[in-house]
Image (cartoon, helix red, strand yellow):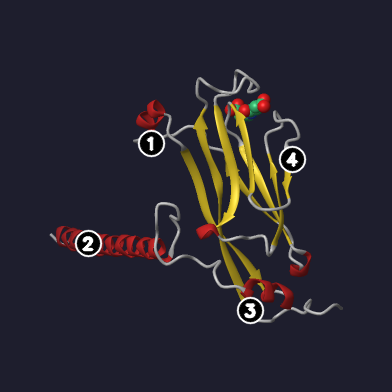
């Protein structure tokens, strides 16, 4: 066995990343090469949070587009791991990540619904001013019992961890996780209070019922 392929027992190491797409409506002054039925320009991407480079452990990312696209399987061998295209429709893109050989890890796949059109309360406003639409997910690569080599790669340089504070560019952070935890514990407290209130109500009704029965 070559050095570093031994696995480190009882150890788990995670690396955060984001994937998704941004899209903008095509303008009047679009290039003549773009087919006339295309309405948007978009980019689907997979990247580290906080601009971190994933290529020390990600070997390639394969984006599988809708079969209406020529060469619909796009293999990106170096960062930025992204594909820019124009088109007219939304569809599901599979994003398959291959790790460097030293990692001895199976590839992983994520599915992303390409979003071109805004929806929700701001939709109409965004539509009229041609704003960029973004649809992005936060996730983490979780390596269980990594090889010594992978461990070394991942811990060699600092960074590649969740940033402390949120910002316009980096919506995913320890701060936003804590906010989410606060929201969850508020909701939990509300549910508990409701359960208590309803339990008391049931109790009262049961007492009234048995009082009526004994009349
Ligand atoms: C839909 N089910 O009907 C989806 C399919 C496919 C989008 C969307 C192709 C561009 C090209 C394109 O935009 N496909 O022909 O190059 O909405």
Of mark 2 and mark 3, the one earlier in the sequence is: 3
Vertical comparison of 146 with 27: above or below:
below
Which residue, given by chain and number where applicable, does mark 2 sit on?
A: 197
| Residue extending furthest toward the bottom | 9
Residue at 74% across, 68% down: 103
Q: Give me the C-alpha separation between circle 1 and circle 2.
A: 34 Å
Q: Which marked residue is nearer to the observer: mark 4 or mark 3?
A: 4
Position of 138 with respect to 31 (left or right) is left
Which residue, given by chain and number where applicable, does mark 1 sit on?
A: 120
If the image is split into quadrants, where does the N terminus sit?
bottom right
Vertical comparison of 67 with 51: above or below:
above
Quadrant of the rendered image containing residue 208: bottom left
Of mark 3 and mark 1, the one earlier in the sequence is: 3
* Residue 97 coordinates in the image, percent (x, y): 69, 55
Which residue, given by chain and number where applicable, does mark 3 sit on?
A: 11
For label 4, the SS is: strand
Q: Quadrant of ligand 1?
A: top right
For label 2, the SS is: helix
Q: Give me the C-alpha separation between circle 1 and circle 4.
A: 32 Å
Which residue, given by chain and number where applicable, does mark 4 sit on?
A: 73
* Residue 138 coordinates in the image, percent (x, y): 52, 55
Quadrant of the rendered image containing residue 52: bottom right
Label 4 neighbour load within 10 Å: few <14, some 14-19, many 20+? some
If the image is split into quadrants, where does the C terminus sit?
bottom left
């Amino acid at each position: 066995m070559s050095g570093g392929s031994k696995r480190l027992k009882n150890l788990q190491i995670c690396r955060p990343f984001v994937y998704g797409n941004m899209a903008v409506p095509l303008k009047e002054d679009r290039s003549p090469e773009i087919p006339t039925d295309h309405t948007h320009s978009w980019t689907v991407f997979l990247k580290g949070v906080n601009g971190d480079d994933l290529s020390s452990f990600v070997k390639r990312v394969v984006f599988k587009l809708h079969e209406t696209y020529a060469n619909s399987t796009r293999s990106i061998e170096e960062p930025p791991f992204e594909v820019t295209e124009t088109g007219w429709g939304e569809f599901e893109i599979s994003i398959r990540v291959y790790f460097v050989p030293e990692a001895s890890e199976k590839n992983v796949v994520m599915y992303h619904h390409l979003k071109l059109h805004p929806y929700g309360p701001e939709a109409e406003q965004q539509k009229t001013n041609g704003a960029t639409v973004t649809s992005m997910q936060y996730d983490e690569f979780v390596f269980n019992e990594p090889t010594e080599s992978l461990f070394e790669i991942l811990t060699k340089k600092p960074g590649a961890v969740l940033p402390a504070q949120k910002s316009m560019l980096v919506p995913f952070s320890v701060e936003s996780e804590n906010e989410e935890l606060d929201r969850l514990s508020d909701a939990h407290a509300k549910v508990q209070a409701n359960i208590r209130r309803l339990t008391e109500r049931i109790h009262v009704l049961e007492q009234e019922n048995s009082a009526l029965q004994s009349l």
